[in-house]
Image (tube, helix red, strand yellow):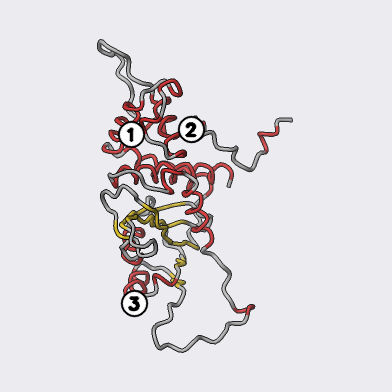
Amino acid sequence: MNKDKHNTKPNNVDYFCVPRPLWRRIKKHLPKSPRKPGPGRPRADNRAVINGIWYVLWTGCQWKAVHRDWFGVSSSVLHERFQRWQQQGIWAKIFQTMVRFYARKRCIRWQWQSIDSKSVPSPLGGEATGRNPTDRGKRGVKIHILVDERGAPLAIHITGANQHDKWSVEDLIFSIVVTRPSVEQHLCLDKAYDSADIHGLLTDANYHKHIAHRRRRGEPLPEPVPADQKHPARRWVVERTLGWLAKRRSIRTRWCKKAENWLAFVQFACAHILCDLAIFG
């Protein structure tokens, strides 16, 4: 009996090769090589290029550290192709494609959604960075993400580390890749989002909001809630998804000076997460 047929867990990540299920669904979005190439060296194969970008995503190494013998492509070609695909919007299309693939395979669990953010250091600075108040004022950025009940990312937004979390809620809600159905939907957020404007925004967006209460200055301590009356925890899925993203070293620390390049890495990583959730659940 073939054991892989009944495997319910993704295989260990191969840093040198994009998983075949993911490659089969993203290759159609990559520009095709011309049928009649001109004189000179032939164009590098897209499969080799995407494997090189995949390696940089996971290891966080410099582009020039990728040896030509590893993928048959020079580091300059990898970097140039990565940036060109970003300018053409290909990484955004890949993310959108995998959201729709996940929706077809597993059906998006709209009933319970969550939003959270993660601060990431940016030692080289660059665009869309800010002084992180939780890291001694060092330069940093934030990943803001909206997920469904399983933790599948449906919307991504990045800002400087000095921007308050609540200012990204509207961008996340209105940038969800697929159309929200008219069913009962709950949205869970932590106490950083407890403000009157966020409550009003979620009401207008037809959400049943579940926001942890932020105690104001001078407000008396709340009475303890019995264990049998507490609402079950549902925000852990977004924290788990942010943990999955942090396993990739190019996302754990932002080395890109251009914000759109780092966003492309985040979109590529989310596409992989969606692929695994669609296939393995």
Q: CA distance from mark 2 to mark 1?
A: 15 Å
Q: Secondary structure at mark 1?
A: helix
Q: CA distance from mark 3 to mark 1?
A: 41 Å
Q: CA distance from mark 2 to mark 3?
A: 44 Å
The residue indicated by pointer 3 is: 196
| Viewer-side label of 2, 3 | 2
Q: Residue at x 38, y 35 (%)?
A: 62
The amino acid pointed to by label 3 is: Ala
Does residue 194 sit above or below 38 in this rendering?
below
Mark positioned earlier in the residue sequence (2 or 1): 2
User: 270 or 68, which is in the foreground?
Assistant: 68
Mark positioned earlier in the residue sequence (2 or 3): 2
The residue indicated by pointer 2 is: 18
Does residue 159 sit above or below 187 in this rendering?
above
Q: Secondary structure at mark 3?
A: helix
Graded by Cα atoms within 10 Å as few (under 14), some (14 to 19) or many (20 or more), the crowding at tag 2 reads many
Indicate the position of residue 214 as horizontal and vertical percent values.
43, 77
The amino acid pointed to by label 1 is: Phe
Q: Residue extending furthest right?
A: 1
| Viewer-side label of 3, 1 | 1
